[in-house]
Amino acid sequence: MLKLASTLHRRISFKNFISGAAALCASGLMWAAAPITNAQTPANNKIPNLASINFAWHAAGVHWFDPPPGLGRGPIRQDPAYHYHGNLDGPGQVTPDIGNVKDPVLKPWAAKQMQESNEEVLTGKRGLPFAAQSVCYPGGVPGQLLTPAEPFYFIQKPEQVWMIWQRDHMVRRIYLTDKHSEGVKPSWFGESIGHYEKDGTLVVDTIGLSARNSFLDWYRTPHTEREHVIERYKLSNDGNRLEVLVTVEDPHTFNEPLHMIQRWRKVPNPMRETVCAENNGDHFGKNLFPIPQADKPDF
């Protein structure tokens, strides 16, 4: 099961869900450049219909899409020396995600850490690279947005928005307020505050993110606890597609902010029980990353 879960992300292809370059261009026009600012709560805003018991949101890909032209630099990409081939790319050997550690946006420590992870896979020390959701860890922010294969759901309340992933029922809470708490303690999903803009865009501002085993993408791009993330969620006009523009600032990890896009399509999926830890083990001797273990029971 672990091997299947670890490779699920390769089974989702952007071309399966987006129909042609025209859709790409139209979607890219959704966004204008937006600087990172703390979330505020203007009045008389449109509330988008993100939540329902009748539908969920299914990822259109497992790698970040590029931002609109002129916004700024995009996400980390595959090392060009190692061609990526997924399960949906036709006949051929499936290859691992190997991040481009020579990207000039990376601080030296981050590039070194990514290179060490790459070498574990390339030398065969690890059968598969670390993938948070595949070994029962939360994906962090914004990495959780790349969760593949299984959908996620919204609950919209007057003072909070909840994002609930079917995979292990991970829950992230967004508080509709205009000010972060004092002295936020780092955690998997940090502290997220947000507001709806007049056009229905949900803007989310997140700080207080723990860094251990938390990455921005499937290339294991790291961050520090100084990471600051702004997300702008916007529905398509027909309400059947959802797109988020993510901006990541972490001056201790990156030489400039990263701008990335993720997309989902609406699907009529009722939530099912998915327990990540069931029957997970390294049954084929691939030196896989183990699932989290508790030193003592908490009950």
Image (spheres, grey):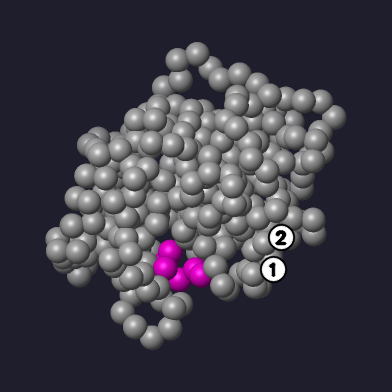
Q: Quadrant of residue 77?
A: bottom left
The picture places residue 109, in percent across and down from the top left corner, at 24, 38
- Does residue 10 appear to the left or right of 196 in the view shown? left
Q: Quadrant of the C terminus?
A: top left
- In the rendering, which numbered label is found on residue 26? 2
- Does residue 104 appear to the left or right of 124 in the view shown? right
Q: Quadrant of residue 110?
A: top left
| Residue drawn at 69 percent across, 39 percent down | 202
Name the secondary structure under disc 2: helix
- Specify whether residue 10 is painted magenta: yes
Q: Quadrant of the N terminus?
A: bottom left
The picture places residue 246, in percent across and down from the top left corner, at 55, 43
Q: Residue furthest right?
A: 44
- Specify whether residue 7 is painted magenta: no
The picture places residue 58, in percent across and down from the top left corner, at 59, 60
User: Which residues lie in the magenta part?
Assistant: 8-13
Amino acid carrying label 1: it is Ala
Q: Are marks 1 and 2 in contact (CB under 8 Å)?
A: yes
| Residue drawn at 49 percent across, 46 percent down | 73
CA–CA distance in space, label 1 to label 2 = 6 Å
| Residue drawn at 61 percent across, 52 percent down | 68
Q: Is residue 156 above or below residue 40?
A: below
Q: Is residue 116 above or below residue 15?
A: above
Judging depth in this view, the residue of 27 and 57 nearest the camera is 27
Amino acid carrying label 2: it is Ala
| Residue drawn at 44 percent across, 27 percent down | 208
User: Which residue position holds label 1?
Assistant: 22
Q: Residue furthest top?
A: 182
Q: Is residue 127 above or below residue 179?
A: below
The picture places residue 245, in percent across and down from the top left corner, at 59, 46
Q: Residue furthest bottom?
A: 91
Judging depth in this view, the residue of 79 and 131 nearest the camera is 79
